[in-house]
Image (cartoon, helix red, strand yellow):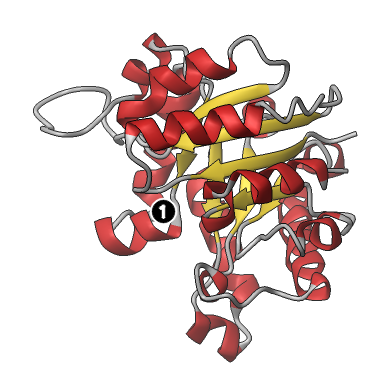
Amino acid sequence: MRKQIAAANWKMNCTFQEGEKLLDDILGAEIELANHQLAIFAVPYPYLLMTRSEVEEEQNYYVASQNCHHKKSGAYTGEVSAAMLHSMNVNYCVVGHSERREYNGETNAMLAEKVNLCFENFITPIFCCGEPLNIREAGTQNDYVAAQLKESLFHLPADKVKNIVIAYEPIWAIGTGKTASTEQAQEIHQYLRSVIAGQYGEEVANEIPILYGGSVKANNAKELFSCADVDGGLVGGASLVAGDFIEIIKALK
């Protein structure tokens, strides 16, 4: 079975003390994950070591960075490289979140560089793709997300790409309270998998977890995750509430 993943994206939230308590409360639930299930915490840079320390004794619980720079090193004040993350034993990195694309001008070409650097440093990219409202309303979301995959990932050989995690974000549903219907989620996830299969074959496509990332909540996670091609969620606001994220982890297939 494909990996089923509950990934928390704290974004720019929580003080250090609040983050510690949140992790303690979630881990205190003592959820035993199956071999194919993962819980990942994408936390702000200052909390990476604390989070790694909290989860390193737990089976299938991991820490992720919310970003890395697209250059190996250099005069980039305030930035963090993939090599730095690797040196801290960070296993995952979110790449291309819609907020990074919008507020920081990240392009598909830049994200291809980030993906390369993640793999060079033994970090699994959680690659985000997804369309804004105007694209969805125009009905051109398939072409839009296919271009994101092709321009950022399709330079990779099959043995690399099969190890990636993809997070589909309907940008129109992030933080708005709107959620794609289960039918919409399954349809676009199935399409993404078909695009990958067209380039790399069905065997590779069927190994890649595709997470849903648009207003996943405790009360809709089970229904969303029940879709054949939805392999968990990249969770924003609900990941900041211990009880909610606990229920989301429990909703994994």
Residue 19 is situated, as x and y percent measured from the top left of the image, at 43, 34
Say if 201 sits above or below 159 in the image.
Answer: below
Disc 1 target residue: 108
Q: Which one is in front, 173 or 95?
A: 173
Q: Residue furthest bottom?
A: 138
Hey, which quadrant is residue 224 in on the image? bottom right
Placement of 21 over or under 169, stated as above or below = above
* Residue 159 drawn at (x, y percent): 68, 25
Q: Residue at x 10, y 32 (%)?
A: 77
**Looking at the image, can residue 28 be seen?**
yes
x and y percent of residue 185 in the render?
75, 67
Location of the N terminus by quadrant is top right
Question: Percent position (x, y) of residue 167?
Answer: 61, 51
**Residue visible at 57% across and 90% down?**
138
Identify which amino acid the numbered label 1 is placed on.
Asn
Picture quadrant of residue 66 = top left
Left or right: residue 239 versus residue 5 is: left
- Can I make out residue 156 in this image? no
Query: In the rendered view, would you say 252 is above or below 36?
Result: below
Tell me the element at label 1: helix
Taking the spot 85% from the left edge, 44% from the top edge, the residue there is 202
Q: Quadrant of the C terminus?
A: top right
Asked if residue 220 lies left or right of residue 15, the reply is right
